[in-house]
Image: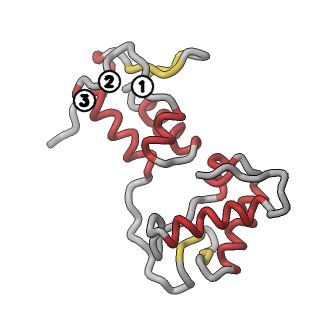
Amino acid sequence: MSMLDRDGPVPIYVQVADEIQDRITSGELRPGEPVPSEAELEAEYTIARTTARNVARELRRRGLAHTVQGEGTFVGPLGVPRAKPTRAIYVIIANDLAARIRRGELRPNRAIPSEQALMRQYGVARVTARQAVSRLREQRWVVTVARRGTYVADPAGWPEEPPA
């Protein structure tokens, strides 16, 4: 992600739309896949909801995306077959971290990777990294200590091994 020029003549929503267009033309985002949601754009670029909404409008104007009411904005023109929904990325991240904990790569009473590290490693917005950590907390893999961080929980509290 490049730095947005917040003081220049090009509107922020156009700059963000340019970055999403780059993801589309590079193949990172393929036809039928969802473009980042308004909430993800807000978190990733530190922009207002209205600005995020304008990004989707700009992508539609350029013919790069279409919006399905109540479902989101997707790469390509209306009618392009949508990518099969996969597990939410935060679930994949949480499962990944849980596997690392179970294997002993992340040890009890030691910090898990920071939100920033998760954002970099998985290429996700802060909100997605937070959802992953929240899921780990709900499953009792980790505990969060206010103003200190999130740590691997005591193994006695971990969930049971999933059935084979």
Q: Residue at x 41, y 72 (%)?
A: 83
Q: Which residue is mark 1?
A: 112
Residue 123: horizontal and vertical position, in percent?
Answer: 48, 48
Q: Looking at the image, which is closer to me, 78 or 164? A: 78
Which residue position is annotated with label 2?
106
Quarter holding residue 61: bottom right
Colour mode of the rendering: secondary structure
At a point 48% along the width and 83% down the height, the residue shown is 80
Q: Nearer the viewer, residue 47 or 101?
A: 47
- The Cα–Cα distance between marks 3 and 1, rounded to whole angstroms, is 20 Å
157 to 164, vertically: above or below = above
Badge 1 local density, few (<14 within 10 Å), some, or many (20+)?
Answer: many
Left or right: 67 with respect to 49? Answer: left
Q: Amino acid at mark 2?
A: Leu
3 vs 1, front mark = 1
From the viewer's perspective, tell me whether residue 85 is left or right of residue 74. left
Name the one closer to the observer, 140 or 83: 83
Q: CA distance from mark 1 to mark 2?
A: 7 Å
Name the amino acid, label 1. Ile
Q: Position of residue 36 (x, y in %)?
A: 57, 60
The residue under label 3 is 160
Provide residue 74's location: percent of width, then percent of height. Answer: 55, 72
Tag 1 near tag 2, CB within 8 Å: yes
Residue ranking furthest to the bottom? 79
| 159 to 157, vertically: above or below | below
The single residue placed furthest to the left in the displayed view is: 164
Mark 3 packing: few (<14 Cα in 10 Å), some, or many (20+)? few
User: Which three-letter amino acid code belongs to the residue tagged 3?
Assistant: Glu
Of the numbered discs 3 and 1, the one sitting upstream in the chain is: 1
Label annotation for residue 75: none
Instruction: Identify the residue at horizontal 42%, vertical 25% (top origin).
Output: 112
